[in-house]
Amino acid sequence: MSTQATGMRTNMKGFLRWMKRNPRKRTDGYFTFAGKALSHEQVKKIVDYAVKNGYETDADIPGDEVAKIIGRDKTTYKEIDIDFNEKEDEECTK
C-alpha cells in the first residue's frame, strides 16, 4: 500500500486524527494498493486497523494484511504484483 505521492509515507495516527477533524473530506484515492486507488471506506478500514495493530506508517502494513482488509484474497494480490513487475521489466529492456 502506498500514498499517491511517490516516496512519502503517511503516519497512521496522524491520518486518523486528520480524518476525525475533517469528517466531510473523502479519502478516495489517497492510497493505492496493487496499482488501484482505494475507496473512502477501504481507507477508513485500513487506517483503523493500522492504528489498532500498532503500525506507524502505511509502508509498515504487510500487503497480505491489506488484501484481507479490503476483501481481496492473497492470491489475487500476488498475481497483480507479479504482473505489474513483469510489465516494468519489459519496459526497462526496450
Image (spheres, grey):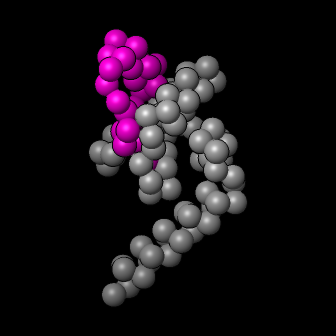
Q: Is residue 92 above or below residue 3?
A: below
Q: Quadrant of the C terminus?
A: bottom left
Question: In the image as oriented, which residue stretches furthest toward the top?
Answer: 21
Q: Is residue 40 left or right of residue 68?
A: left
- Number of numbered discs overlaid on the protein picture: 0
Does residue 73 show up? yes
Visible residue check, residue 50: no
Q: Position of residue 60 (x, y in %)?
A: 54, 36
Residue at the spot x=56%, y=64% of the render? Answer: 80
Q: Residue at x 36, y 79 (%)?
A: 92
- Residue 33 position, x and y percent, is 49, 50
Give the quadrant of residue 51: top right
Q: Is residue 41 above or below residue 68?
A: above
Q: Position of residue 40 (x, y in %)?
A: 43, 34
The residue sitting at the front extreme is 24
Residue 92 located left or right of residue 61: left
Quadrant of the rendered structure where residue 76 is?
Answer: bottom right
Which residues are drawn in magenta?
A: 9-32
- Residue 24 colored in magenta in the image: yes
- The picture places residue 46, in percent across and down from the top left corner, at 54, 32
| Point 61% across, 57% down: residue | 77
Magenta includes 86?
A: no
At horizontal 42% and vertical 73% (from top left) the residue drawn is 88
